[in-house]
Amino acid sequence: MELIMKKVMTGLGAIALMASLAACSGTDETAQNGAANDMNTMMADPDNPFAQSEMAMDSAINAAVGVNAGDSWVRKMIEHHKGAIEMSRVALTQKPTADAAMMAQQTIDKQTKEIADLEKLVATGNPDAASGELYRAATMQMHDAMMGAKGADISETYLRKMLAHHQGAVAMSDVALANGATGAVRAQIEKTKADQQKEVAIVEAMLRGEPMTPAAQVASPAKAPAPAASPPDPKPATAKPAPAKPKPAPEPKAPEPTCLPEHRAAGHC
């Protein structure tokens, strides 16, 4: 009898364990399905046609890891720029304002060129996961700001998302500069940071209602040209000596009197 009871209890325990595992599995599956549904809903949101591009960019940035902090920046910035290009292409399909369309096209052109420059800097070697983690906070903040950015219309939404996008690039660049990036990579980081700061200024101006301004015109004020060297003071002309006064002509001598013979005979001379 005791043996039978043990078998029954063992069987009940196994059944309970299986039920528990099934419940956990169901919970995990439900959570995964819920996350997938949320993702699909976000991607299909007609008020945010950029969502799919934003999610893909965030995933690619997080997956990009290099051999050190500088190389991780290079790889992540490539994905960052690809995201900007894709979002700009989406913007151009949404009938944006003329200024927003101009900005989108310029973004595509500039980021395409810079991706080519960045790809030349990619290092080879074993990836260092820790170097990638350095950027986690900056990229998460950028992603959250972009996903939450909305405007009164599609053009303003695009501008606000790009503002957060450019600010994120500046933050990522600061991380790289603070973590030992050197050489050509550091030079590129400094250039990218400066370019992105100009873009931030452009977008902020557009959000204030100002017209689109090419980045080249937002550069730091040019230094005033050095004043032209004044011509050397003319050397004082050498004073010419005053012309010598002409010597007075000698007074003509009075002609000696001529004594005629008859005068001489008369004793007059």
Image (cartoon, helix red, strand yellow):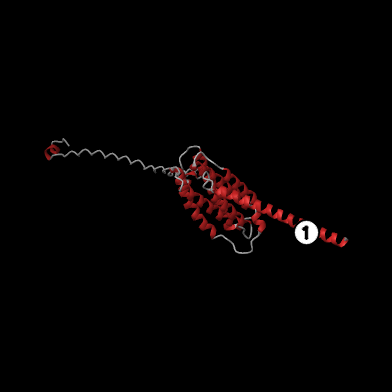
Residue 92 x/y as whole percent:
46, 48
User: Is 30 drawn above or below residue 150 in the view shown?
Assistant: below
Who is closer to the viewer here, 9 or 227? 9
Q: Look at 54% across and 59% down and name the residue there.
A: 119
The total of numbered circles placed on residues is 1
26 horizontally vs 145: left or right = right
Residue 35 x/y as whole percent:
62, 50
Which amino acid type corresponds to the residue marked 1 in the rendered image? Ala
Q: Quick one: label 1, few (<14), some, or many (20+) residues within 10 Å?
A: few
Residue 265 x/y as whole percent:
13, 38
Q: Look at 59% across and 52% down and name the residue there.
A: 58
Who is closer to the viewer here, 175 or 11? 11
Who is closer to the viewer here, 48 or 200? 48
Residue at the limit of the structure toward the bottom, as seen here: 125
User: Is 229 drawn above or below residue 59 in the view shown?
Assistant: above
Can I make out residue 248 in this image? yes
Dot 1 lies on which element?
helix
Q: Look at 25% across and 38% down and name the residue there.
A: 251
Q: Look at 56% across and 45% down and name the residue there.
A: 164
Write down the residue under mark 1: 14
Who is closer to the viewer here, 249 or 108? 108
Residue at the limit of the structure toward the front, as seen here: 1
Residue 40 x/y as whole percent:
57, 50
